[in-house]
Amino acid sequence: MIAIGVDIGGTSIKGAFINERGEILSRFSMKVDKEKTPEEEIGKLCDIINASIKEGNYEGKVAGIGIGSPGTLDMDKGIIIYSPNLAKWAGFNIKKFMSARTGLPVELNNDANVAALGEAKFGSGAKYKSAIMLTLGTGVGGGIIIDGKIYDGNKHQGAELGHMSIRMGGRPCGCGRKGCLEAYASATALIKDTREMMEKHPESALTEIEKELGGVDARNAFIADQRGDKYGRKLVRDYVKFLSEGLLNYCNIFRPEVIILSGGVANEGENLLKRIRRYLKKNTYGMRGSEKVAVVTSQLGYDSGKIGAACLILFK
């Protein structure tokens, strides 16, 4: 069986033909013009898919198309209700349109959910029945997998993992609330904290590291910490505590077998993971008597969205 996985982003759409072992057979991509209608852009996508089926000799072998899309979705009907980076797509029935243009069944789900599904089926979560994936990037997104299936709550409106409060009345969050995990544990938050620390303490190693890297990103604080800089150490200590507190809540509520971290901050690997594991071991409800939750990094990387979208068809 072969399925097509499509990962929609604000500036580009990437897709792949994927077999039932989760292997990518071929890829395709296109840039998105936000000024054009969804009919124009998705029409172009369908043309690429139809041409790729012929070029790859996939006629009669493709079971369907799975789509991972950002924004608010009516997943049952296949409608993109609203996507902040694709405003003109509001109300567009992508499922109906693509099915008509390709002759294939189409399934739609949230991009974070399908990325989690891809990791759960063919990545770092493949040997577990339950998993939570958290992406630490511009924001904090993620997905919950229970018994190999996406759990996203009533009418698919749940699993907003970045918008759990970890500090009442805390930092403002883009969602309109205060104290959300996203406001403390995203790469954006860490970069903001790093810049503020540099302004307060220009004598710190952070200033030199900014020159070395040509700017500030999620790496700066960790590099300063490794060099023994006390300000870098504080940034990392606080960041790990914020993130771990959020993960601790997931452990206490869901008790997944594994938590998978992806995104820029997760590139710190064991340097980050070992600190989180210590925190969870010390503070998880039940402590020694509780089931251990593994904490790992993403195995599929940027392919998780495409592979997860294909899983909507492969495991339907």
Image (cartoon, helix red, strand yellow):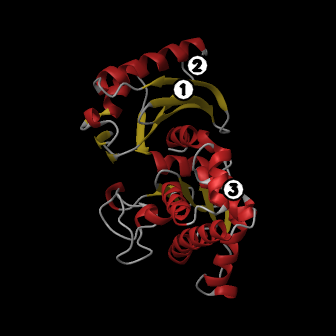
Instruction: State the image quarter where residue 213 is shown.
Output: top right
Q: Is residue 122 above or below residue 225?
A: above
In the image: residue 95, left or right of residue 68 = left
Q: Position of residue 292 (x, y in %)?
A: 68, 75
- Reading the image, the residue beneath label 2 is 58
Residue 167 image offset from top left, x and y in percent: 42, 76
In space, the residues marked 3 and 1 are separated at their CA atoms by 38 Å
Q: Position of residue 21 (x, y in %)?
A: 68, 39
Q: Amino acid type of disc 2?
A: Tyr
Residue on which the image places disc 1: 62
Residue 98 appears left or right of 133: left
Q: Quick check: marks 2 and 1 in contact, CB under 8 Å?
A: yes
Disc 3 residue type? Glu
Q: Which residue is found at the position 49% from the left and 62% from the top?
A: 196
| Kind of residue sitting beneath label 1 | Val
Mark 3 vs mark 2: in front: 3
Report the front residue among 168 and 216: 216
Label 3 or label 1, whichever lies nearer to me, is 3
In the foreground, 193 or 96? 193
* Residue extending furthest toward the left: 91
Residue 151: image location, x then y, percent? 46, 59
Which residue carries the number 3 mark? 268
Q: Dot 2 lies on which element?
A: loop
Q: Residue furthest front?
A: 203
